[in-house]
Amino acid sequence: MSAAAPPLFSVRLLAGWLAAAAVACALSLFMITRSAPAGEHAANASPTIYSRSAIGYAALYHTLERLGIPVAEETSAAGAPGDAAVVVIAEPNRDLYVLARVRTELRHARAVLLVLPKREALIDPDQPDRIRADRLLPVETVQRVLTVADAQGTVDRASALTAVQAKAPLAGTAPAVGSDVQLAISGSLDPLLSAAGGTLIGELRGFGGRVIVVADPDLLENHGLLRGDNAALAVALVRELRGNSSGRVVFDEVVHGYVARPFGALRMLFSFPFGLVTAQIVIASALLAWAGSARFGAPKPRAPALTTGKRALIETGARLFEVAGRLRFITERYAEAVLRETAQALHAPRGLARDDLLAWFHRTGRPAPALGAADDAGTVLAEAQAMHTWRRDALDEPGRRTQHR
């Protein structure tokens, strides 16, 4: 028999390849799905807690954090978490989805600090986290946000801040606002900080929880937090809304477009670039199964140990003279081969031992000729001929066909 062919692939190599691909895929999924804390987002110049520009809210976020007030960000489309003591909605976008979200949180949150928008920033192309200039939003645009909270409220602007009056918890604070002071005018607002012409900060009635509206964002933005008593005023507002609760102050960043999409592992595994890793794992698994299999397809038939027929008899007879002294062994091998071939042709039960097979032939009316003990060439040839004749009779082969075998 020829030597076995070497395996096409190394099982150890393929197993290592498969393990490396699986680890790379798992690590990638972990890195992409883990929660990123505030500050790891790309620098920007929008009114978010990630922005250190003039109109950002990073200063307020970190000030509260350093004062021991637990703060968090919210990027889930499902809404603020149930343990949120205060939800801060700072200058939300004006699209319909965001306004609908603001309306929902006003109705269901325990306390909401709503800051109206005022300016539109022009980003510095050389420094994306800074603003080059800003311009006031139209009053009608700001009005859309206020209407979500107070359908009867209106927005107005004054050239300067005059006749300031503050009520608890803001009493004693001196707010500082630049030009174009933005005010809210509404009979539903209880002023906490008012000025000539309207309300800077007021509490809205008619909601299940507390809702405080800050009409002018200059009081809380990065650039304004260092002016006057604005920082103390901001902290006092948060503490007033939080009360004795141990919950967190949650800044809603979904209103600025930061939405954490629902994680779908199956969809991600088949999307670029994770689809490449998935394909690698599938290929490695297939090759590993291939390399570990015993064979492919149907087994290759083995050549019979000793063929039958006239030519075989002649060759066997010639070898009998060459291997004198082992005639009985050759006869037994020939008889065994004939028995097995005949049994296969007659569909005898598989796996029978030689004695059981002889018994089966006897039960089925085809008793095989017995082999003697003599070791001379004539006897051996006669027994071989007898086995050949028995096979022909057992298989009921036509005489003419037998003659040509």
Image: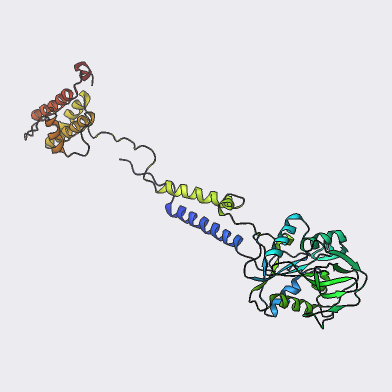
Res. 365 image quadrant: top left
Q: Where's residue 301, x and y in %?
A: 31, 35
- Does 70 sit left or right of 343 as displayed? right
Q: From what the image shows, is residue 378 above or below residue 64?
A: above
Q: In which quarter of the image is the N terminus?
A: top left
In this view, the residue in front, 224 or 363, is 224
Q: Where's residue 192, x and y in %?
A: 80, 76
Res. 110 image quadrant: bottom right
In this view, the residue in front, 181 or 325, is 181
Would you say residue 323 is visible in this rendering? Answer: no
Q: In which quarter of the image is the C terminus?
A: top left
Would you say residue 395 is visible in this rendering? Answer: yes
- Does 225 sit left or right of 163 as displayed? left
Q: Where's residue 140, x and y in %?
A: 86, 59
Residue furthest top in the image = 400
Q: From what the image shows, is residue 282 above or below residue 105?
A: above
